[in-house]
Amino acid sequence: MDIQYIVLLSDLFHKHGEITVTLYQDFLVWKDIGKNLKGSSGSVSPTAHSHTVHVREIVAVHKTDTSDPTKAIKHLQLNPHAFTVFYVSRMTQHQWQCGHITFYSDNLGLCQQWIQTINDQLSTQTNRPKSLLVYINPYGGKRQGKHIYDQKVAPLFSRACIATDVIVTERANHARDHLKTEANLDKYDGVVCVGGDGMFSEILHGLVTRTQSEHGIDPNQPDAHLAPCSLRIGIIPAGSTDCICFATVGTNDAVTSALHIIVGDSQPMDVCSVHHNDTFLRYSVSLLGYGFYADVQTDSERQRWLGPARYDLSGVKTFLSHNYYEGTVSFVPAEDNVGNPRDKEQCRAGCRVCQRKTSLQQPHDDKPSHTGSDTWTEIRGKFIAINAANMSCACPRSPQGLSPSAHLADGTADLILVRKCSRLDFFKHLLRHTNKEDQFDHSFVEVHRVRRFRFQPRHNEPVSLEDLSEPQKKVDLSPCCSRCHYASCTCSRWTCDGEILPHVAIQVSVQCQLIRLFARGIEEKNQNQSPPWLLEAGAHRSVD
């Protein structure tokens, strides 16, 4: 990075003494300049204690009322004017808080100049939202959604001068239905959901359905290329698991998510469209699961009175049942340039794979994104679980997720097939989701990176015309699953981001970068260090 020019530089005071404050094009830097830190030439020692904040991570700057006795400092009599800068402060690698520092001066005009100049710099951040539509689910998780928003999020939005219209939902799919038809979306820069993964799914379905309707696209066409949504979605986690927030930010913290929204972060995300024949069923952004995970979800719905603990109970019951299901999985493999699920290249902020896909994206033309030339691969067998992951599906209980190297925005999903095996082997597979061992390193597990896939359970696989012409051929009445009772077979169901689908035979297409979140992906440890040139540039006091 080239050394940037200085926009404004002044010697000011803060509560611990005199400091030099420098505003560059992209950074705000303040450095202690106590007498013991100055060299013989009068320049500031590069080893002086300094702080650097990226301009894009400044939340706001406001004039400070120095008449408030709680803000009194020993320099106040000589420096009665002040302004405060609010900014993103990293508590841990992924968790943020809103830090602040107050600068004092004896010159009112200088303080006003600093406020105006910083605001001018912030005005260049055109990706920042000015108006948001907020939906709050008051019943999700521990029923703390409204409290979390009122106490932690609303004050931050107010400080950043973001206007909000808040709707507290009163029933299931309230937010989805309002977005589909009633909401005047032209007046907003984004939509925020306060709740869990279910609430996010409502926002997703409402926004995507509205967008396709406005573009005249029929969602019942499995091969349709869907129009991307123009509004970004923000997630304030207030649910039971908050998997989507964790996988895109790295933590489930309301303040962190609010700050990502304020600074205008933007993370593209793939969405799977799920169909049964020519009928649209649902959209999925995290996990499509058949077998084990769907059985856990189905059983847990009967135990909702237990709260989040129901998942543990249902998980144990389903594991002990150890059911398997027979069927056929067909899929179109992804191109080689998006890597493979076992390459250990995890999706992080600034992901190379996802950025390359962004550069290849073409403007929407309402044409099918797939052609008849797709080469399908077919696998038949008995499966304990079939999972399709659009993202890592990481969460606090499974920090690596179901597919650690899945990407958020590469136009693919990782299809994980767990074949029939012993209960002990399956337990070993599950255990690896809680540590860093390769959960795919088993003979009964295979994983494929795919663009499309289909599933057909054995008990309702179509019969060919050739079979119908041979009346003497015996009908195969062998069980299609471990709990099969022939005509009364219940088999498993698909769970789609926590919702049970009404059909088992499905077709899935990955819609590349259909939506965008107020997020930046999970940051690496050293991804936000100050550029090296700041160490030298901060040592020079001269300015034109």
Image: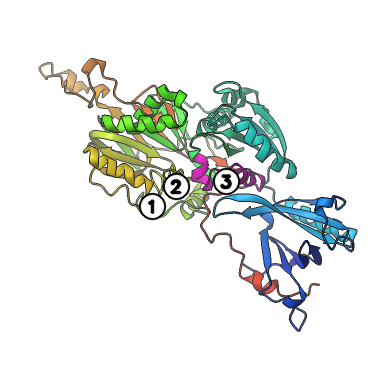
The answer, for residue 398, to whether it is visible in the render is yes
- Please identify the dominant SS of the magenta region: helix
| Secondary structure of residue under mark 2 | loop
Q: Residues within 10 Å of mark 1 (few under 14, many from 20)?
A: some
408 relative position to 47: left or right: left
Q: Which residue is at the front of the view, 15 or 298?
A: 15
> Label 3 amino acid?
Ala
- On the image, the x and y values in percent for residue 128 come to 68, 46
Quadrant holding the C terminus: bottom right
User: Which region of the structure is painted magenta?
Assistant: 244-266
Which of the two marks, 2 or 1, is nearer to us in this view? 2
> Label 1 amino acid?
Gly
| Secondary structure of residue under mark 3 | loop
| Secondary structure of residue under mark 1 | loop
- On the image, the x and y values in percent for residue 6 come to 75, 67
> Label 2 amino acid?
His
538 relative position to 489: left or right: right
N-terminal label among 2 and 1: 1
Q: Tell me, yes or no, whether the two marked residues, 2 and 1, touch with CB atoms within 8 Å.
A: yes
Mark number, residue 519 = 3
Mark number, residue 339 = 1
402 relative position to 518: left or right: left
Per the model, the C-alpha gap separating discs 3 and 2 is 14 Å
- On the image, the x and y values in percent for residue 182 come to 65, 23
Q: Tell me, yes or no, whether the two marked residues, 1 and 3, touch with CB atoms within 8 Å.
A: no
N-terminal label among 3 and 2: 2
Which of the two marks, 1 or 3, is nearer to us in this view? 3
- Residue in the picture at 57% in, 43% down: 253
